Image: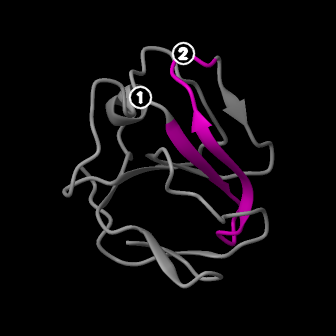
Amino acid sequence: MIYHADTERYLARAPVTAWRWHMRLRGMIGRHFSESMDAMIFPRCNAIHMFFMTMPLDILFLDRENRVVRAVQYLRPWHPGVYAGNAVTTVEFPAGTLNGVKPGDRIVFSAGANQK
Protein backbone atom coordinates (compact mmCIF):
# COMPACT_ATOMS: atom_id res chain seq x y z
CA MET A 1 0.00 0.00 0.00
CA ILE A 2 1.04 3.59 -0.56
CA TYR A 3 0.05 5.98 2.22
CA HIS A 4 0.26 9.78 2.23
CA ALA A 5 1.29 10.42 5.83
CA ASP A 6 0.59 14.16 5.81
CA THR A 7 -3.06 13.85 4.75
CA GLU A 8 -3.49 10.40 6.33
CA ARG A 9 -5.00 8.80 3.23
CA TYR A 10 -4.12 5.88 1.00
CA LEU A 11 -2.97 6.73 -2.51
CA ALA A 12 -2.91 3.08 -3.60
CA ARG A 13 -3.92 -0.21 -2.02
CA ALA A 14 -2.56 -2.62 -4.67
CA PRO A 15 0.63 -1.16 -6.19
CA VAL A 16 2.89 -3.23 -8.42
CA THR A 17 6.67 -2.81 -8.29
CA ALA A 18 8.50 -2.93 -11.62
CA TRP A 19 11.74 -4.67 -10.66
CA ARG A 20 12.48 -6.54 -13.88
CA TRP A 21 13.72 -4.74 -16.98
CA HIS A 22 10.77 -5.79 -19.14
CA MET A 23 8.29 -4.43 -16.59
CA ARG A 24 10.25 -1.18 -16.37
CA LEU A 25 10.41 -0.89 -20.15
CA ARG A 26 6.68 -1.42 -20.65
CA GLY A 27 5.43 0.43 -17.56
CA MET A 28 1.76 1.28 -18.01
CA ILE A 29 1.83 1.05 -21.82
CA GLY A 30 -1.13 -1.09 -22.86
CA ARG A 31 -2.25 -1.63 -19.26
CA HIS A 32 -5.11 -0.24 -17.23
CA PHE A 33 -5.42 0.40 -13.54
CA SER A 34 -7.74 -1.91 -11.63
CA GLU A 35 -8.40 -3.24 -8.14
CA SER A 36 -5.46 -5.62 -8.55
CA MET A 37 -3.07 -2.85 -9.69
CA ASP A 38 -3.79 0.77 -8.79
CA ALA A 39 -0.23 2.15 -9.04
CA MET A 40 3.13 1.18 -10.51
CA ILE A 41 6.37 1.75 -8.57
CA PHE A 42 9.69 2.22 -10.38
CA PRO A 43 12.67 1.93 -7.98
CA ARG A 44 15.94 3.53 -9.10
CA CYS A 45 14.09 5.84 -11.51
CA ASN A 46 13.93 9.63 -11.77
CA ALA A 47 12.34 10.15 -15.21
CA ILE A 48 9.45 8.81 -17.29
CA HIS A 49 7.98 9.35 -20.75
CA MET A 50 4.42 9.09 -22.00
CA PHE A 51 5.04 7.77 -25.52
CA PHE A 52 2.50 5.12 -26.58
CA MET A 53 0.28 5.85 -23.56
CA THR A 54 -3.49 6.06 -24.04
CA MET A 55 -4.47 7.64 -20.70
CA PRO A 56 -3.21 10.52 -18.55
CA LEU A 57 -1.29 9.71 -15.36
CA ASP A 58 -0.33 11.35 -12.08
CA ILE A 59 3.40 10.95 -11.38
CA LEU A 60 5.14 11.05 -8.02
CA PHE A 61 8.92 11.43 -7.68
CA LEU A 62 10.41 10.50 -4.28
CA ASP A 63 13.81 10.93 -2.63
CA ARG A 64 15.68 8.36 -0.50
CA GLU A 65 13.52 9.16 2.54
CA ASN A 66 10.29 8.77 0.51
CA ARG A 67 9.61 12.50 0.60
CA VAL A 68 7.93 14.00 -2.43
CA VAL A 69 10.42 15.76 -4.70
CA ARG A 70 7.89 16.48 -7.44
CA ALA A 71 4.24 15.65 -8.08
CA VAL A 72 2.87 15.94 -11.62
CA GLN A 73 -0.86 15.75 -12.19
CA TYR A 74 -2.69 14.80 -15.37
CA LEU A 75 0.38 14.16 -17.51
CA ARG A 76 -1.10 13.63 -20.95
CA PRO A 77 -0.34 10.76 -23.33
CA TRP A 78 2.55 11.29 -25.76
CA HIS A 79 4.20 13.91 -23.54
CA PRO A 80 7.98 13.63 -24.10
CA GLY A 81 8.58 13.09 -20.40
CA VAL A 82 9.17 14.49 -16.94
CA TYR A 83 12.21 14.37 -14.69
CA ALA A 84 13.22 15.04 -11.10
CA GLY A 85 17.00 15.03 -10.71
CA ASN A 86 17.21 14.12 -7.03
CA ALA A 87 14.45 11.49 -7.10
CA VAL A 88 15.26 7.79 -6.63
CA THR A 89 11.76 6.34 -7.01
CA THR A 90 8.94 7.15 -9.42
CA VAL A 91 5.32 6.09 -8.95
CA GLU A 92 2.60 6.21 -11.60
CA PHE A 93 -1.06 6.60 -10.55
CA PRO A 94 -4.39 7.08 -12.31
CA ALA A 95 -4.95 10.75 -13.12
CA GLY A 96 -6.63 12.56 -10.22
CA THR A 97 -4.97 10.56 -7.45
CA LEU A 98 -2.45 13.16 -6.30
CA ASN A 99 -4.79 16.01 -5.39
CA GLY A 100 -3.28 17.74 -2.36
CA VAL A 101 0.15 16.07 -2.63
CA LYS A 102 3.07 18.54 -2.64
CA PRO A 103 6.87 18.55 -2.42
CA GLY A 104 8.13 17.63 1.04
CA ASP A 105 5.17 15.40 1.90
CA ARG A 106 5.92 11.99 3.42
CA ILE A 107 4.94 8.80 1.60
CA VAL A 108 4.88 5.41 3.33
CA PHE A 109 5.13 2.08 1.52
CA SER A 110 3.75 -0.85 3.45
CA ALA A 111 4.65 -4.48 2.86
CA GLY A 112 2.82 -6.25 0.12
CA ALA A 113 3.60 -4.22 -2.99
CA ASN A 114 3.26 -6.84 -5.74
CA GLN A 115 6.32 -7.71 -7.78
CA LYS A 116 4.69 -8.94 -10.97
User: What span is colored magenta in the figure?
Assistant: 57-79
Q: Amino acid at mark 2?
A: Trp
Q: In the image as oriented, which residue stretches furthest toward the left?
A: 36
Tell how many labels.
Answer: 2
**Quadrant of residue 64 in the image?**
bottom right
Q: Amino acid at mark 1?
A: Met
**Magenta stretch: includes residue 59:** yes
Disc 2 designates what residue? Answer: 78
Q: Residues within 10 Å of mark 1 (few under 14, many from 20)?
A: some
**Magenta stretch: includes residue 11:** no
* Disc 1 element: loop
Say which residue appears at 19% left-offset and 56% top-offset: 36
> Label 2, label 1: how many angstroms apart (C-alpha)?
9 Å
- Seen in the picture, residue 103 relative to 88 is either above or below; the reply is below
* Disc 2 element: loop
Say which residue appears at 51% left-offset and 21% top-offset: 77
Relative horizontal placement of residue 69, taking residue 36 as reference (left or right): right
Give 3 or 41, whichever is nearer the viewer.
3
Q: Which mark is residue 55?
A: 1
**Quadrant of residue 10 in the image?**
bottom left
- Seen in the picture, residue 112 relative to 26 is either above or below; the reply is below
Q: Which mark is residue 27?
A: none
